[in-house]
Structures are given as C-alpha cells and as structure tokens.
C-alpha cells in the first residue's frame, strides 16, 4: 500500500494533451513541489480512477501549495508512448510523476531507473 497510498494522497507530455495549473502557494517558487499526473485511457472525466487522481491533485494544490501538471493519453498508445510521456514530465522538473493505472507500471519502472529521484508511483500497481 505504501507508495500507492502516498501517490493517491498527493494525486487522490509529449505524447498527449497536457495542461498545467499553478495552485496558490506561500512557499517560494524554488521550493514549490510540482506533481505530475499521467492519466490512463479514458483520461480526466472518466468518472473513475482518473477523476479520483485529479481530485487528489486539486486538493494538493489547494491545501499544500503543490503545482500540478497533467498529461492525457493518446488513442491506441503503447508502452513506448507512456515512457515518452513520463520522461517529458520528469524532464520538466515534476517530482513526483504519477502514472494512473497499472498499465503504467512498466513505463514507471523504466523511467524511474533513468531519473532515480523518488517518488514516482503508479496508483494501482498490482501486487
């Protein structure tokens, strides 16, 4: 439960549509955490786990001053697309980068090795 719970608490690109929100923050910009969410198929508005992750991001923005970034999936994408999206989010300075859904687990494992700066998580990694 550890990382998944932490990711959901905080959260609950290059390949897809993306947007950013800059929640209010009392901390200086250099200390503001930028959390990124890469949505699974269905994206935001799916009335399911993507929306739950978005609600968590909104709460983190409002209550913790986190800056949020979002990335939507592309139709018919594969694992390489997920890796590219997560890599773009990590390169942009986001930390954590959260992949919503178990389908992100292989991409997260690959990108995490390249960046080695936890936390990165999947919200529904199988056990």
Image (spheres, rainbow, N blue to C red):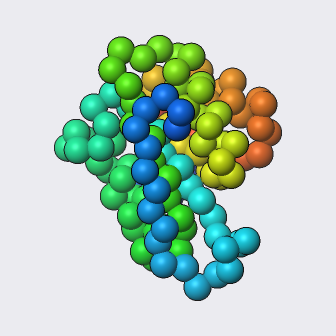
Vertical side of 81 occupied by 31: above or below = below
Measuring 43% from the left and 50% from the top, which residue is drawn there?
Answer: 19
Measuring 33% from the left and 58% from the top, which residue is drawn there?
Answer: 55
Would residue 46 be seen by someone viewing this image from the given angle? Answer: yes
Q: Nearer the viewer, residue 108 or 78?
A: 78
Q: Is residue 23 left or right of residue 96?
A: left
Q: Nearer the viewer, residue 13 or 25?
A: 13
User: x, y percentage for residue 96?
Assistant: 62, 50
Would residue 127 be seen by someone viewing this image from the given angle? Answer: no
User: x, y percentage for residue 112?
Assistant: 71, 34
Q: Quadrant of residue 40?
A: top left
Measuring 56% from the left and 16% from the top, which residue is drawn there?
Answer: 80
Residue occupying the far bottom of the picture: 26
Q: Nearer the viewer, residue 101 or 27?
A: 27
Q: Quadrant of residue 101?
A: top left
Vertical side of 74 occupied by 21: above or below = below
Q: Quadrant of residue 85?
A: top right
Measuring 22% from the left and 39% from the top, which residue is drawn there?
Answer: 46
Q: Is residue 55 left or right of residue 90?
A: left
User: x, y percentage for residue 124?
Assistant: 45, 34
Looking at the rendered structure, the number of numbered marks drawn on it comes to 0
């Amino acid at each position: 439960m550890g990382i998944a719970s932490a990711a959901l608490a905080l959260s609950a690109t290059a390949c897809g549509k993306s947007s950013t929100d800059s929640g209010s923050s009392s901390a200086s910009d250099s200390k503001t955490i930028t959390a990124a969410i890469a949505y699974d198929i269905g994206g935001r508005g799916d009335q399911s786990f993507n929306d739950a992750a978005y609600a968590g991001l909104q709460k983190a923005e409002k209550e913790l001053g986190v800056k949020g970034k979002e990335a939507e999936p592309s139709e018919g994408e594969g694992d390489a697309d997920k890796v590219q999206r997560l890599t773009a989010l990590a390169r942009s300075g986001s930390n954590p980068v959260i992949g919503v859904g178990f389908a992100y687990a292989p991409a997260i494992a690959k990108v995490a090795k390249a960046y080695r700066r936890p936390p990165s998580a999947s919200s529904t990694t199988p056990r």
